[in-house]
Image (cartoon, rainbow, N blue to C red):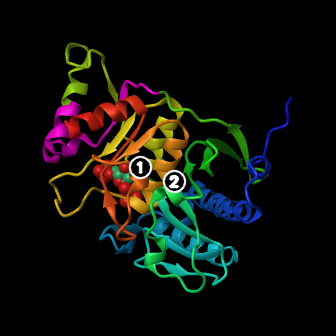
Amino acid sequence: MTPMTTLTEHLKTQKTPESLIGLISNITATCHDIAKLLHHGPMNDILGLAGAENVQGEDQKKLDVISNDMLKESLAGSGLVRGIASEEEENCVGCSDVGEYLVLFDPLDGSSNIDINSLVGTIFSVYRADENGRVEDRNFLRPGHEQVAAGYVLYGPSVILTLTTGHGTQMYMLDQNKGIFMLYNAKVQIPKATKEFAINASNQRHWAKPMQNYIADLLAGETGPRQKNFNMRWVAAMVGDVHRILCRGGIFTYPWDKKDPNKAGKLRLMYEANPMGFLVEQAGGKAFTDTMRILDIEPEHIHQRVPVILGSADEVDICIGYHTA
Ligand code: AFP
């Protein structure tokens, strides 16, 4: 049997700097600890609400808070990180004044799934720190195309790490006994065409006209203008929907809607759209708002929200076509 390649070994073949390998190992080791907590969920008294709201005005689950603290502590103690920004923290948190990296994360994406034992994940995004000294929020406001690494750990029937350092997208599976991530897909490739879409259809009446028209044409199936039948999936955790798309193609969208016209979308640019956009592009897919490439957005705020349309390249082009017509 061919020996399997570990995460560290594979990163070395990509000539990844030692410090970045150390940082990724730090993040994935913490995710392994989060996976162990999730595994014993109901026995650990970690389910349910924490009794507070995060900066986005959303109810925090106990596990949102616990996993945020675990990542914050391990990254701060690594000596590799200048500062972190998290979906669960109001402002960035300074770590080491000489750390080489800035790390942004959503510690537990899809946390409404925790209590029903369904998919959740940790999403992270890494930039090189540019200035010495203390960090402020403004140091994090850089476009997604400057990320040096991005990934997620999906806590499902298997614990999966999907990672890019700009050399394609790879998938690794956690060997629970050894606590090591093993490479199993060295070149993730999203099919260009698809017959599957993901959208929270309960918001349909709130969508803008172009999204209404696009989804109506998908639903019309083979008798409509697309002349083929589409299937729909919705995990309610972006990490689960994006994982499916990386495995077998599809289009995922969380569009702007009129429900809360002051919000540009539901998903966060820095913790969700940028890292997922990097992974999807590195796997041959596309990631757009309704008008532009996500990775080219100049962020204005660390908690900024954006509309998201990502997945199979041809299908994203078609969807964007409805918005630019
Ligand atoms: P939480 O992390 O607060 O559960 O939000 C998850 C999420 O931001 C994203 O992962 C999902 O795609 C989306 O929300 C689900 O939203 P709906 O509640 O509209 O299904």
**95 vs 189: above or below:** below
Q: Which mark is residue 237?
A: 1
Q: Position of residue 323 (x, y in %)?
A: 22, 40
Q: Position of residue 191 (x, y in %)?
A: 49, 27
Viewer-side residue, 118 vs 228: 228
Q: Residues within 10 Å of mark 2 (few under 14, many from 20)?
A: many
Q: Is mark 1 within 8 Å of ligand 1?
A: yes
Instruction: Identify the amino acid type marked 1.
Output: Ala
Q: Position of residue 88 (x, y in %)?
A: 43, 71
Q: Which mark is residue 121?
A: 2
How many numbered discs sit on the rendered protein?
Answer: 2
Q: Residues within 10 Å of mark 1 (few under 14, many from 20)?
A: some
Position of 198 with respect to 165 (left or right) is left
Would you say the residues marked 2 and 1 are in contact, meaning their CB atoms lie under 8 Å apart? yes
**39 vs 247: above or below:** below
Residue at image point 47% right, 71% down: 140
Disc 2 element: strand
Extent of the magenta region: 192-215
